[in-house]
Structures are given as structure tokens and as C-alpha cells.
Image (cartoon, grey):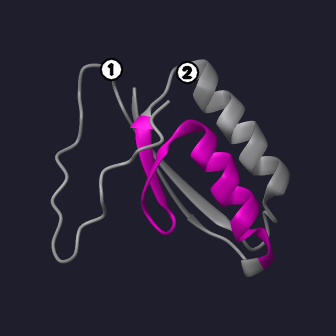
Amino acid sequence: MHVIVVYDTATQRNAKILRTCRKYLHRVQRSVFEGQLTEAQLRRLQAMVENVLDLTYDNVLVYTFPPGTKPQRLEWGATEPPPTDVL
């Protein structure tokens, strides 16, 4: 399935969330990641992220799209170079 993860965390947890998301997805903006994951990979990512979060302050949004579908992404302004660290 296609997955988009967006996070908003306290500064002291940003680096840990960043490293965790990079293990599974491609970074498209500072706190936005996307890519293809299996259900098992998504569950592992969720467990790892939840171990870092302060659930009273931090927020992570996860958008999932069923297999065979992919959202259309429009970019306005300066674009990021394509990822080089593909799984």
C-alpha cells in the first residue's frame, strides 16, 4: 500500500522520528515521508514511532492508500531532488 506520514513532534524527538521514518519511507519534505509498505512494515513503523512519541504533545498523521492506487501529488515551488536511498 502507498503510505504518507506527516509528523509534528517536539524538537528533542524530531531526530528519532526522522531516523525511524527513513528506515521505511522516502523523505519528501522536512517532516513528510512517503512510500510503499506492507501491512507488517506499517505495524513495525507504528510501534517504533509510538515508542518515541509523547502522546500528550506529539502528533503523527498516516495516510494509507489501498494496493493498486497511488495519490496524485502536485508540487508548487522549489522541488526536492529524487530520493537516492530507495529501499
Residue 86 locus on image (x, y percent): 45, 35
Given the image, on which type of amino acid does mark 2 rest? Glu
Residue furthest front in the image = 84
Query: Please, is residue 75 above or below residue 34 in the view?
Result: below
In this picture, residue 35 sits left or right of residue 57: left
Helix, strand or loop for disc 1: loop
Question: Label 1, label 2: how many angstroms apart (C-alpha)?
Answer: 11 Å
| Bounds of the magenta segment | 12-35
Q: Which amino acid does label 1 sit on?
A: Pro
Compare marks 1 and 2 and give the one earlier in the sequence: 2
Residue, disc 2: 39
Q: Residue at x 51, y 20 (%)?
A: 38
Identify which residue, 21 or 87, lies in the foreground.
87
* Disc 1 target residue: 67
Occupied quadrant, residue 79: bottom left
Q: Is residue 7 above or below residue 82?
A: below
Residue 3, can we see it? Answer: no
Q: Residues within 10 Å of mark 1 (few under 14, many from 20)?
A: few
In this view of the protein, which residue sits in the foreground, 45 or 85?
85
Residue 62, image x and y in percent? Answer: 50, 48
Please state which of residues 39 and 15 is positioned toward the viewer in this rendering: 15
Task: Give left or right: position of 72 versus 13.
Answer: left
The numbered mark at residue 29 is none
Residue 47, percent across and down? 76, 38
